[in-house]
Image: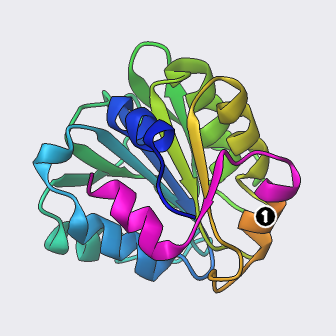
């Protein structure tokens, strides 16, 4: 589908961009990180599933290729504009009303920690309609319920077209829940992100 005025207006008015993904989403998230410049004028929060107890080089790889300041989320970090945050492995990342993150060690959700649902649901309470959330490729249903909560709070919610996702389960689950305002092809997502 082509981008429309409603989508563009809501994207431009958003203060926060949430990007969630699992299997098959790494290349897209890496491309997005390389894409963004400080003129984006938004906070970007990335939640990507990682293997438990697996030392990841994702933060370093992303930071080395980012034109925006990029860092892993730390407990009680403030949420700053023009910063890309990556949810750390083995913790759930929550958004608090005071404009800061908190990290939680409770049980995995959909076998995942960090869970996209946990972050999306807490973000819905705090950011309401000041947020754009995009759910990408993944092999389970994590993120679908959180995306629905964001949509109900007025956030702009987008899913990658399952036909283009390496793993269709995650975007398909969100579509089945009617959590997505829009279903976009990969190139349409990037087209929107640079407006």
At a point 48% along the width and 48% down the height, the residue shown is 4
In the rendered image, is residue 43 in sight? yes
Question: Quarter of the image holding residue 105?
Answer: top right
- Near mark 1 (Cα within 10 A), the count class, few <14, some 14-19 or many ≥20, is few
Q: Is residue 100 magenta?
A: no
Secondary-structure class at tag 1: loop
From what the image shows, is residue 183 above or below residue 80? below
> Which colour scheme appears in the figure?
rainbow
Return the x and y of residue 7 as percentages of the image width and height: 48, 42
Question: Quarter of the image holding residue 173?
Answer: bottom right
From what the image shows, is residue 7 above or below residue 15? below
Q: Nearer the viewer, residue 50 or 10?
A: 10
- As drawn, is 80 to the left or to the right of 11? left
From what the image shows, is residue 21 above or below residue 45? below
At a point 15% along the width and 73% down the height, the residue shown is 64
Quarter of the image for the N terminus: give it.
Answer: bottom right
In the rendered image, is residue 55 in sight? no
At a point 47% along the width and 78% down the height, the residue shown is 26
Question: Quarter of the image holding residue 175?
Answer: bottom right
Return the x and y of residue 126 as percentages of the image width and height: 53, 19
Q: Which residue appears farthest toward the bottom when viewing the image?
A: 166
Return the x and y of residue 190 as percentages of the image width and height: 37, 66
Q: Nearer the viewer, residue 2 or 45?
A: 2
Return the x and y of residue 15 as percentages of the image width and height: 35, 30
Q: Is residue 191 magenta?
A: yes
From what the image shows, is residue 1 above or below residue 24? above
At a point 71% along the width and 75% down the height, the residue shown is 162
- As drawn, is 90 to the left or to the right of 107? left
Q: How many marks on residues? A: 1
Which segment is the magenta one? 174-195
Residue underneath mark 1: 111
């Amino acid at each position: 589908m082509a981008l429309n005025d409603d989508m563009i207006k809501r994207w431009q008015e958003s203060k926060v961009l949430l990007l969630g993904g699992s299997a098959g989403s790494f290349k897209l998230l890496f491309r997005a990180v390389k894409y963004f410049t400080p003129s984006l004028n938004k906070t970007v929060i990335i939640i990507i599933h990682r293997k438990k107890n697996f030392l990841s080089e994702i933060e370093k790889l992303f930071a080395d290729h980012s034109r925006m300041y990029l860092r892993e989320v730390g407990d009680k970090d403030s949420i700053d504009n023009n910063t890309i945050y990556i949810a750390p492995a083995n913790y759930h990342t929550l958004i608090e009303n005071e404009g800061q993150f908190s990290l939680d060690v409770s049980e995995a959700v959909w076998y995942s920690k960090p869970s996209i649902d946990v972050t999306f649901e807490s973000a819905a309470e705090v950011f309401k309609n000041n947020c754009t959330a995009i759910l990408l490729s993944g092999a389970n249903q994590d993120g679908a319920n959180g995306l629905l909560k964001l949509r109900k709070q007025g956030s702009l919610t987008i899913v990658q077209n399952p036909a283009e996702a390496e793993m269709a389960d995650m975007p398909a689950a969100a579509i089945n829940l009617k959590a997505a305002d829009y279903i976009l092809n990969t190139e349409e997502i990037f087209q929107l992100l640079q407006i």
